[in-house]
Image: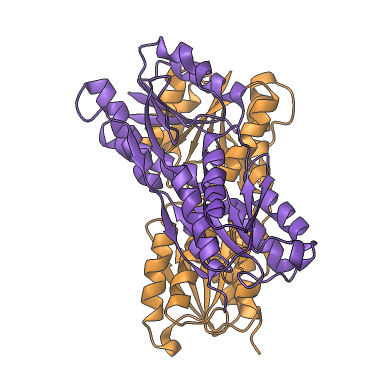
Chain colours: A purple, B orange
């Protein structure tokens, strides 16, 4: 009576909250959940999937590492049901629970424009992860709607506070007129690192640089400058994935893919300028 | 080639960082790590331990739920090596990696006294968890050293931001002269919840109430009022536990228990009063 759950990085509160949701539903139905972290590594992801299979897990939940999902075809051949978490998947035919990340990017970009930003930057990556591409493209679309605003992409290899601090250090060293005045950080952990570093260098948030994060983690509201963020229903995503897996196991309940719309939560880091 | 790791709550950054350390060492040596969350439940903990055993994990790492460890005697009879994480264990004979939590409590209490607090409160629990007792008792010892200071214990069932907010709401409603002026929160997540709620009610930190947290998580420094905290070498704890497990599996490397001393990291939330 076990579910195997492979996530990208459990130190990211997004994934730990999703995990919590999966565990709630599993527990309510008598299942235990074992978790493996792939840390953006296809080899690690494959390792955990094979491990879950060998250990005869009753079902598998997978937040896939970036790129094409063709690599998962072998899993389609197996009887073990699989649910993709935080990734929509039409071609390969797995059930999935996902969020409209393009819409999230659009909300973030439009908000930065509304508060008067002229030089917008998206910070995030890598772009073989569809969520990253969609957030970037949504933001780019918002900028396109508003003619004449500049848009820059700062690509990162991964998303964590340390990467945010490194990029913050670099942005702070630019002359103010060459620095973005509105940043859309691809997640909150990255955004909080950026925030810390900019403030340490005397760059004011939101006066000099406004910041929007993504995920609306618990710490976003408690940040030194409370962080505006795009919220996703994280625990609910985990619960929905758990229910979708149970439906495949028992034949009871909805087998429909679930897709959520994100929300904008406005806080101090994007207070409108005078 | 698998380690099973049972932790209390992966949504707590302390455990996710420890997990990261375990995974690093496992990965360097060709092992995968599967993680189970016990959420303070002895039944869940037992469930994961039996699961790891049944699935023939090569080794088990366990951050035990509170109380006596006699319940783990059956594990001693098995060939699978076990390392206790964040818990010292002389009687039952498991190898362990731990931190001196009494010393952590002492550091926190002495610091609050030094900055001029007169009514000190420890917020945390439950007290069947030895770390909670030790942090409380260390703080109580510091108060005893300084005659005449009052000491109060606010016991909680668990440690998370929501519990912190609920207790913050209650403390904020007290008249200032009956409210603690120095709080030692048993971990940072709880402390950040307290901080958020006190500020929302107009209670100033540190002017009205100083706060010390525990764990020095990444978000402590990025908090709305940067949080003073007791730091533990979290990732190193995970790495040491991984090495201790490998030593038992291979006969190579130190088989000695590891015990760390915590440190005080001073930030804005305990700035000395005028």
Q: Residue at x 44, y 76 (%)?
A: B200
Q: How many marks?
A: 0
Residue B56 visible (yes or no): no
Looking at the image, the residue that sits furthest to the top is A77
A104 and A81: which is toward the camera: A104
Q: Nearer the viewer, residue A79 or B2?
A: A79
**A69 over B257 or under it: above or below:** above
Image position, residue A57 (x, y; %)? 39, 20
- Viewer-proximal residue, A247 or A108? A108
Q: In the image, residue A240 lies at what x, y percent?
A: 32, 37
**Left or right of residue B145: residue A4:** left
Q: Quadrant of residue B261?
A: bottom right
Expressed as whole percent of the image width and height from the top left, the position of residue A60 reads: 40, 24
Is residue B235 something one can see in this rendering? yes
- At x 66%, y 33%, the residue is B24
Q: Where residue A222 sits: x, y (%)?
A: 51, 65
Residue at horizontal 47%, vertical 47%?
B11
In this view, B241 is above or below A218: above
In the image, taking residue B88 as reference, residue B199 lies left or right, namely left
Instruction: For the C terminus of chain B, give its image quadrant.
Output: bottom right
Q: For the point 35% across and 12% down, which residue is it? A: A79
Q: Residue furthest front?
A: A147
Residue at far left of view: A252
Instruction: Name the quadrant of the N terminus of chain B.
Output: top right
């Amino acid at each position: 009576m076990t579910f195997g759950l492979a996530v990208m990085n459990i130190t990211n509160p997004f994934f730990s909250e999703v995990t919590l949701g999966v565990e709630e539903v599993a527990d309510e139905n008598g299942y235990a959940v074992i978790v493996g972290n792939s840390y953006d590594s296809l080899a690690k992801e494959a390792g955990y999937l094979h491990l879950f299979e060998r250990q005869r897990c009753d079902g598998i939940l997978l937040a896939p590492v970036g790129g094409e999902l063709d690599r998962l075809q072998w899993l389609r051949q197996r009887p073990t049901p699989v649910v993709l978490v935080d990734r929509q998947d039409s071609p390969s035919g797995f059930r999935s629970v996902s969020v409209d990340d393009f819409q999230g990017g659009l909300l973030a970009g439009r908000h930065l424009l509304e508060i008067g930003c002229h030089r917008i930057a998206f910070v995030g990556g890598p772009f073989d992860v569809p969520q990253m591409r969609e957030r970037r493209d949504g933001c780019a679309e918002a900028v396109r709607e508003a003619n004449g605003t500049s848009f820059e992409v700062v690509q990162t290899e991964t998303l964590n506070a340390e990467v945010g601090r490194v990029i913050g250090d670099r942005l702070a060293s630019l002359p103010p007129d060459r620095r973005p005045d509105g940043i859309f950080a691809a997640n909150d952990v990255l955004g909080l690192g950026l925030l810390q570093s900019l403030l340490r260098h005397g760059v004011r948030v939101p006066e000099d640089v406004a910041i929007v994060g993504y995920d609306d983690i618990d710490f976003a509201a408690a940040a030194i400058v409370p962080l505006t963020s795009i919220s996703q229903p994280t625990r609910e995503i985990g619960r929905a994935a758990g229910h979708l897996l149970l439906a495949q196991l028992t034949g009871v309940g909805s087998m429909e893919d679930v897709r959520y719309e994100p929300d904008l939560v406005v806080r101090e880091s994007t207070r409108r300028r005078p």
